[in-house]
Image (cartoon, rainbow, N blue to C red):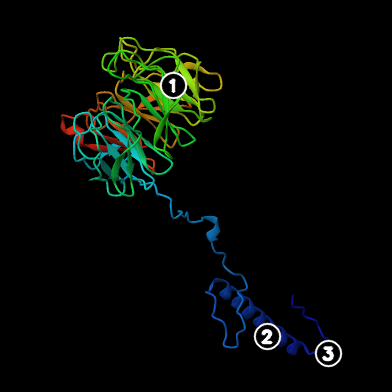
Amino acid sequence: MIQVRYDKRVRPVAWRRRLHALGAALLLFVMAGCSTAVAPSAPPSSRGTPVVSATPTPTASLAATPTPTLSSTATPTPRPSPTLTHGVFTLTGSTKVNRNATAATVLANGQVLIVGSANDPGPAELYDPTTGKFTVTGTPKDWLGNPVSVMLKTGRVLVVDFSPISQPELYDPRTGTFSLTASSWVGREYGTATLLNSGKVLIAGGFTNGYPNMPRSAQLYDPSSGRLVPTGSMKTGRQCFTATLLQDGRVLVAGGDVGGCEAIDNAFSSAEIYDPASGKFTPTGSMTTPRASATATLLANGEVLIVGGTDGNTDLASAELYDPETGTFKPTGSMSEVRTERMATLLRNGRVLVVGGGDSSAEVYDPSTGKFSLTGSMSADRSECVAVRLSDGRVLIVGGEAYSPTGSTAELYWP
């Protein structure tokens, strides 16, 4: 604050002149300050004295909106094109051979191994999500007509063809080749292979040496030795059933039948639990509906969603949930139509995509509401197709009809 002191010794005219001069100086000072507030910062003077703005203009902080970064190993999620909405299917590359009843496994590098087909022995193929193309890789030693593939903790893939004449094989992504393993294999048609937390694989069920030989026995495949060793036996011999690894490391075995998956006449509602710690199977609650050739999906909350299948006389649209805490099943929402020979895939958002069953429609199950809702349709009707979730969250659907153009096509679902 500038103070003006009146001095009686100064003459009135002189005092007024001084007052005017002082006012002018004050006005120039204020104007200079306003000019500095809106002008760009001046560069430092040649003497190095910093120039400080009287009222600097605030600038937006970059910390308020950080730029997301991706780790060197993360795979960014692709985005649909501006004209593409979520919940739709788009065609991608075609396989070299027609495929149905095939197997698909996502490898550590994000590519997908496609192996086997009920009607075409052909080589295995790799799908590359970055290019949308299939390329041929090694050829299995045997014709794998109805295989199940399991990604081992070593990075290799165990391929089990549930046939009395085919021996399990290992696919090595580093060399792109197959090699035989588990020479003590006893063929099990329509059995299951489940990767345990220990890294071993539980192989159970199916029938041997033709129907109606239904063994209750089960085996463990040990990747470190390449051998199969016996483990506990199931309470019921079954085929065309589901086997699901639970969050606590046990395995839920549910449903199935004894009459052959193509001619089911006696579907089961019973279920049992395999405990790797004891190597034993014990009965658990029964399903609300007998089911064979159903699908089972482990949900994020630990429950298991059982969908569709057949009761032996009727194809099913219904679904139910298994609660490991109580060991019981309960009904949940039903699909819009019956579906057999379909695939169910857990999405990143916790919902479950159900595709196939003979037509092009698809549905999504929402655990929060317990309901199914229709989503986009595939480009063609598909039965006995395979579906697998990619590392970026999309779902790859391959094949489905061996003797039609559909058998060599593939498409992507955008959640």
Sequence-wise, the earlier of marks 1 and 2 is 2
Element under label 3?
Answer: loop
Sequence-wise, the earlier of marks 1 and 3 is 3
Regarding residue 414, the answer to whether it shows in the image is: no
Which residue sits at x=25%, y=40%?
124
Label 2, on which residue?
21
User: Relative to residue 188, is residue 236 drawn left or right?
Assistant: right
Circle 1: residue type: Val
Residue 9: numbered disc: 3
What separation in Å lies between label 2 and label 3 (alpha carbons)? 18 Å
Quarter in which the N terminus is drawn: bottom right
Element under label 1?
Answer: strand
Element under label 2?
Answer: helix
Which of the two residues, 42 or 223, is positioned nearer the viewer here? 223
- Looking at the image, residue 350 lies above or below residue 81: above
Where in the figure is residue 321, as x and y percent of width and height?
46, 20
Residue 273: numbered disc: none
Sequence-wise, the earlier of marks 2 and 3 is 3
Residue 253: numbered disc: 1
Numbered label tally: 3
